[in-house]
Image (tube, rainbow, N blue to C red):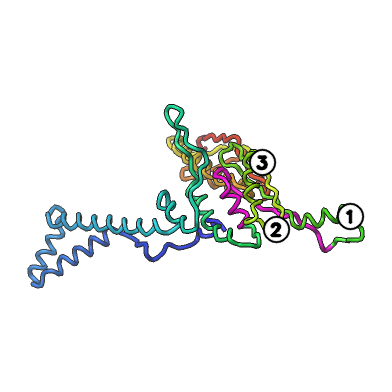
Amino acid sequence: MNLADFSGLSAPALIEELDFETVYAERKAAFLALYSDATVKAEMSKTLERESDPVVKLLQESAYREVLFRQQRNDDVKALLVLYSSGSNLDQLVVDRGLKRLIITPADNTVVPPVDAVYESDQDLKERYLLAMDGLSVAGPVSSYQFYAESADGRVGDVSVVSPQVDLDNLVLENLTKAQLIELIGNLFYLDIYILQNDSESGVATQELINIVQLALDDETVRPCCDKAVVKSVTVVSYSIAATIYAKQTAQAAAVLEIAQQNLQNYVAEQKRIGRSIRRSAIYAALHVDGIEHVNITSPNADIVIDATQAGHCTNIDISVEAYE
């Protein structure tokens, strides 16, 4: 389970849709309702049509304050909902599942200027929060191993659990040697745990981090007694992106290039996870922003399919812009 599973969840009814004009109209209606005399009410109604009148200014100011107050209420509600919460509010929310934000890189006060600590991102903390209940399972589901591996160290950026497949339907036991039979039985309980290191440029995990995660998963309170989990580094698949985008107007070329490059950087960052393939269609969508007539992708020349033991690593991005003719 991850945040993507909840991407289609609509906002709760507690969060109001706010519109200044609606609130302002309500304020004017409430103000006019204070006058019972029809003649006076008609005069005041005309007064409210004059934007420069002090009464109008007061009503506008009070309506704006109400919108701000209600927006603050919305923000307060969101702070208590894990999918919307962030920062210190999220830190407090995850405590109910025994979690705290992990440190990726400790602070260093021995240098000038001092270097602040780098902490686990809100998104990664939320995903661990969603996995926390699976960590209570005694059966060793995939999500449980993911939770404990991700919680072992803040540098664990992603986890994949792969169980070697044995073709039992076509297996002939009589043809196996004793050694092969022992190996077969062992494979039934083996799990390969692949990890991505998020403070590594390529994503390859160091042996130090592998050992830390292995130790966490070998704990008797974590691993079912028959399982044998083997922690490994993810295999990195390097790739580069090169493309030419054609702007409809030469004057917009620099602006659209900046937007397109930022979109592509965001896509590359999102895909630096285990098992996320690099699709040409997604690259095209990232680059084809408003003001672009055409996109020509020269690299990669085909989709880069990433399996559950791999992660993509973009080594270079080269985007040029030309005028469309």
Query: Are the residues at dot 2 and dot 3 in contact (C-beta closer than 8 Å)?
Result: no
Query: In 3D space, how far apart are the residues under numbered discs 1 and 3 (Cα atoms)?
Result: 38 Å
Residue 278 part of the magenta-drawn span: no
- Label 3 belongs to which residue? 237
* Left or right, residue 252 beside residue 61: right
Q: Which residues are magenta?
A: 143-169
Q: Nearer the viewer, residue 187 or 310?
A: 187
Q: Nearer the viewer, residue 175 or 12?
A: 175
User: Whole-percent x and y of residue 49?
Assistant: 16, 59
Choose the circle earlier in sequence order: 2 or 1. Answer: 1
Please state the total of marks drawn on the protein image.
3
Q: Amino acid at mark 1?
A: Lys
* Left or right, residue 4 beside residue 32: right
Residue at 54%, 43% in the rendered image: 294
Q: Amino acid at mark 2?
A: Cys
Residue 150 part of the magenta-drawn span: yes
Q: Of all residues shown, which one is farthest toward the front? A: 220
User: Whole-percent x and y of residue 156?
Assistant: 58, 45
- Label 1 belongs to which residue? 178
Indicate which disc residue 222 carries: none
* Left or right, residue 285 beside residue 74: right
Indicate which disc residue 225 carries: 2
Residue at 61%, 50% in the rendered image: 149
Choose the circle earlier in sequence order: 1 or 3. Answer: 1
